[in-house]
Image: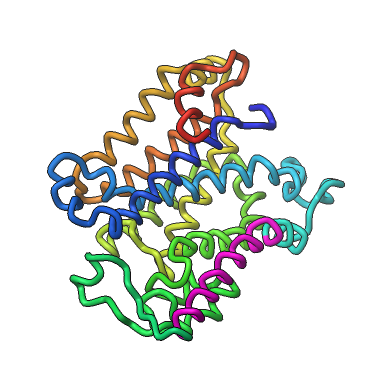
Amino acid sequence: MKNAIPILTPLRGIAALCVVFFHARLILFPQWMTPLQDYTHFIENSYLWFDLFFILSGFVMMHVYANAFSRDKENPASSPPSHALSWGQFMWLRFSRIYPLFFITLAVLLVWESVKSANGLGFYGGALFESWGVSGIPAFDGPFNRFDALLPNLFMLHGITETDLTWNISSWSLSVEWLSYMVFPFLVPLLLRKKLSYLTPLLFIAGLCVVNASKGSLDATGGVLALLRALSSFVLGAWLQTVTLSPRRQQFFNHDITLLVVMMLSLGLLHIPTFTYHNVIVVTSFALLVFVAAQQQNGKPQSSCYWIIKSPAS
């Protein structure tokens, strides 16, 4: 693969749009939620796009940083490469990239709660929340922007310390991804050992099965299960980046039809109602989608599928 993997960026954009619709459905069109399920479960299942983010993140981290944490495979006791990073350097690079925008978003929400508090305004989240009796709650008391959850949010630990969504509600995923970064440098040498590597997908798909069995789905957004969900998908993505293909198999995966079939498989699975371990199967299809997408543009002109995927996110 080339250093740049252009098709993964629009794929991330599509996933982000689907997550936005998943969250927005509660406020923008709550009256359509049940009727829509007579036709498709795509929006209701779109919380699974978070797992695509985790897979993509693991894949890209391995693509960019594998050499920085690897040692000579023939001599594991050898010195690290000259371009190696320490754990602290790696964490600082990740922190400086993700925390500023996270902090700005949190600060904006904090200012908004302060304005509400000063003017005696309570929470209002639309007709659906009002029908649930979740309305008029004083500022800093919830249901999301709670004062007691502010400190864990400042340290990006709310993904495991809070069982409910708090403040920037979608940032639970950033929190557990941040925790996944902490163990990533230690996993790289293990993932690069071919004799052990093929156990990785089985181990972490089993992790997803544990989450699914505990929750009835993969919709775990807080606590240990949320971390297990994120770490399983993240490491699965990192492992995928280590897979090498023969020229013949590379040619098979580097094809519009292969990419289109895998895309349709993922979308089709999101469309249907959930069943036992449906969510795990969807995430496995996402892993395959990321892998196939990453093989594109390798030794061929930009494909039509690339432009189809790229257009909505441009």
User: 104 or 78: which is nearer to us?
Assistant: 104
Please tell me whether residue 33 is drawn above or below residue 246 in the rendered image. Answer: below
Residue 293 screen position, x and y as percent:
50, 29
> Which quarter of the image is occupied by the N terminus?
top right
Q: Can residue 210 be seen in this view?
A: yes
Residue 278 screen position, x and y as percent:
26, 47
Magenta span includes 297: no
Residue for point 35% across, 52% down: 47
Q: Can residue 196 be seen in this view?
A: no
Q: Give the range drawn in magenta.
A: 95-117
Residue for point 25% across, 60% down: 216
Residue 191 screen position, x and y as percent:
60, 46
Q: Residue furthest right?
A: 82
Q: Identify the coloring.
A: rainbow
User: 54 or 32: which is nearer to us?
Assistant: 32
The secondary structure that most of the magenta stretch takes on is: helix
User: 209 or 172: which is nearer to us?
Assistant: 172
Residue 263 screen position, x and y as percent:
38, 30
* Quarter of the figure with residue 116: bottom left
Residue for point 33% across, 52% down: 22
Please tell me whether residue 79 is drawn above or below residue 312 in the rendered image. Answer: below
Horizontal side of 96 relative to 139 (left or right) equals right
Residue for point 47% across, 64% down: 172
Please tell me whether residue 252 is drawn above or below residue 313 in the rendered image. Answer: above
Horizontal side of 243 relative to 268 (left or right) equals right
Magenta span includes 114: yes
